[in-house]
Amino acid sequence: MNNEFFKNEIDKIKIPEDKLNKALENGIRKGKRKRNTIAKKIVYVLGAAAIFFSLFVGSAFIYSPIGAIASKIPYLSALFKEDSLEEIILQKLVDKGYKVDGVGTSYKPFKQVEVTVVGSSQYYNSVHQQIKTVVNDILQSKGYDSYSIKVVRFKNLDNNLTEKEKEIILFLNKEVSNGLIKSGYNFNSVDVAPWEKTVYIDVEGSKDYYNDVKPKIEKDIKKVLAKNNYSNYEVKVSRISLQIKKVDSAESKVVNVIGEGLMSKEKYKVKSITYKEKPLTFIIDTTIQSSDKDSKALGNDIENEVEQLMKSKDVVTRLGDKSFKLVIYSADHKKIN
């Protein structure tokens, strides 16, 4: 089969207008990208497997009372009663008069708190170090030692982008979305950031699906970009989920407390938390190797924290006597609890 024949066959593929339009809407709506953060907690639901993945894009719990910790109230149980890290940081910054658009936390590719500032470049330059200091003080008050802090300036799509940047966003959103649909990839959105010379693609599907298609998508979209004279753009592929929605269940509250509490402290070496509802199972992945002499002790420490949380009055009130399973894995995927 020669290249010309292949091209003609591809060009015959009918692109579903509704899906393309939806992808374009998502891309344009998120075209402010710099990965603007959200001040509200979001849990992403992988519907096909009925497993809830708490990605913690803006999910944390604030201000552990120092007195509570000192009096040996279980660490995670104390966190269960508290507000989100984003909310406390946002409120503190607003109270101090800073112009902040949003606050968020992320754990991949590294643990980071990001604050988005609204205003001129002069205003941003005058306050960004002060804001870092405020955030750092809050993190230290909680004993959180695994975060870096990033303060960025909000770039409004409508007001701050040049006409050329707007044209690039519209054009590349359409071309990239078109290419993904033609190739049959499952994706949630395409976001173009001309100021970063980057195209962000969120893949829908299981972890196995994502791992399989990620290199293929990167290769295929690089070709699309090169064809349109944008070969200097990067392609970054991430995985969110099949469906995005807020989950306010007791289980989601518990898993977010576990996630924020364990992942925010280096000593626990936790890199991800997932859970499924039936039966209620918490799955914790760590960075420690099973051959490490401290791996079993770490597994026991984590298990004790989670068990204390599940026995606390607040959790029992919301979950009743619902039983649960806890599985803790080492970096080489061996059970350590």
Image (cartoon, grey):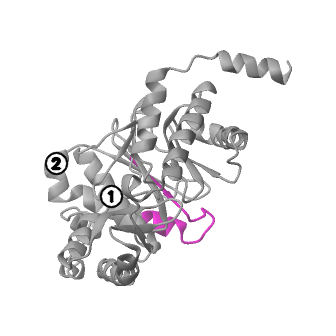
Q: Earlier in the sequence, mark 1 or mark 2?
A: 1
- Is 88 positioned to the left or the right of 239 in the image? left
Is-magenta flag for residue 296?
A: yes
Q: Which mark is residue 318?
A: 2
Percent coordinates x, y for residue 194 in the rendering:
55, 54
Count of all numbered marks drawn on residues in the image: 2
> Which residue is label 1 attached to?
59
Given residues 86 and 268, the one toward you in this image is 86
Return the x and y of residue 75 as percentages of the image width and height.
28, 70
Residue 59 in the figure: left or right of residue 197: left
For label 1, the SS is loop
- The crowding category of the residue bearing disc 2, from other C-alpha atoms within 10 Å (few below 14, some 14 to 19, many at least 20), is some
For the point 51% across and 65% down, which residue is it? 110
Query: Residue 13: x, y in percent?
Result: 63, 17
**Outermost residue to the front:** 163
- Amino acid type of disc 1? Ser
Q: Residues within 10 Å of mark 1 (few under 14, many from 20)?
A: many
Label pair 1/2, CB-CB below 8 angstroms: no
Look at 33% across and 38% down and name the residue there. 277
How far is the residue under mark 1 from the one under mark 2? 19 Å
Q: Which residues are magenta?
A: 282-300
